[in-house]
Image: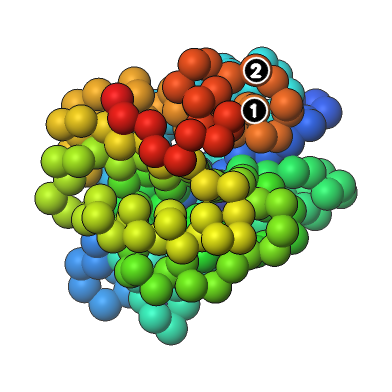
């Protein structure tokens, strides 16, 4: 039986005004190895989902996506799992709810590449593992992007993510927060990553006033150093 992607609820209000879908990272292990709910890359998204749900104040439906397989299987990529999840959520709510994708590592790459999906309005890429060519295909108009990357990341290159951000900036509103001393696991200065994701999702989906860091991003400051 093939592995299947799964949606995990964090908070689902009765009448949500928007949806936030969180995408985990995690490298491949063996061929088509299933994702475990207890693997560290999956667990790292739990506190971020909780912070987003709290920031949404009962107006955002928040879900975590568990991919069908670990890593990036080229025959069925995490982008395919995102498309499946968005279809499921669209059917569940029977409405075109604006959606923010929040992804870490390979999940950040999946979020960027899935930005063209119908309901997506914004993307948060946390320490994204990307190729520079990932910014070559412009998404439809109106998408907003936020990259948050530590400058001490030895797994996913912050230089590559900065190139992708620059390329996307030719057609979209793109902010970039560079976290001094931040590493790939986002444990050091973790509140910067978590709060930025929650503030950006809330501001872009609900129009709420964000905290000072994301305010600088939304005011057009291309690179914010913290």
Residue 80 to residue 217: above or below: below
Left/right placement of residue 76 relative to residue 163 reads right
Residue at 33% in and 55% down: 161
Q: Is residue 63 left or right of residue 155?
A: right
Which sits earlier in the primary sequence, circle 2 or circle 1?
A: 1
Residue drawn 46% across the image and 77% down it:
76
Disc 2, disc 1: CB below 8 Å? yes
User: Is residue 112 rendered to the left or right of residue 117?
Assistant: left
* Image spot of residue 150 (x, y percent): 24, 38
Q: How is the image coloured?
A: rainbow
Report helix, strand or loop for mark 2: loop
Q: Which residue is mark 2?
A: 209
Q: Is residue 194 above or below residue 126?
A: above
Residue 165 percent coordinates (x, y): 43, 54
**Between residues 127 and 216, which one lies in front from this camera angle?**
216
| Residue at the spot 79% in from the left edge and 44% down from the top edge | 97
**CA separation in Å, label 2 and label 1:** 6 Å
Tell me residue 211's x, y (percent).
Answer: 52, 16
Q: Is residue 67 visible?
A: no
Please give the residue where the numbered disc 1 appears in the rendered image.
203
Q: Quadrant of residue 209?
A: top right
């Amino acid at each position: 039986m093939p592995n299947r992607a799964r949606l995990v609820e964090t908070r689902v209000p009765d009448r949500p005004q928007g949806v936030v879908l969180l995408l985990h990272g995690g490298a491949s292990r063996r061929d088509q190895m299933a994702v475990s709910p207890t693997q560290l890359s999956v667990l790292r998204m739990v506190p971020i989902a909780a912070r987003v749900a709290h920031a949404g104040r009962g107006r955002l439906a928040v879900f975590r996506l568990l991919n069908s397989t670990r890593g990036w299987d080229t025959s069925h990529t995490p982008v395919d799992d995102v498309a499946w999840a968005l279809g499921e959520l669209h059917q569940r709510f029977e409405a075109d709810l604006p959606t923010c994708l929040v992804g870490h590592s390979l999940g950040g790459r999946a979020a960027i590449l899935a930005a063209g999906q119908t309901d997506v309005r914004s993307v948060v890429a946390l320490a994204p593992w990307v190729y520079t060519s990932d910014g070559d295909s412009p998404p439809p108009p109106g998408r907003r992007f936020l990259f948050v990357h530590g400058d001490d990341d030895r797994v996913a290159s912050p230089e590559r993510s900065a190139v992708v951000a620059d390329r996307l900036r030719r057609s979209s509103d793109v902010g970039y927060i560079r976290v001094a001393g931040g590493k790939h696991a986002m444990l050091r200065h973790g509140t910067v990553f978590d709060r930025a994701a929650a503030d950006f999702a809330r501001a872009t989906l609900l129009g709420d006033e964000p905290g000072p860091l994301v305010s600088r991003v939304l005011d057009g400051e291309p690179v914010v150093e913290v």
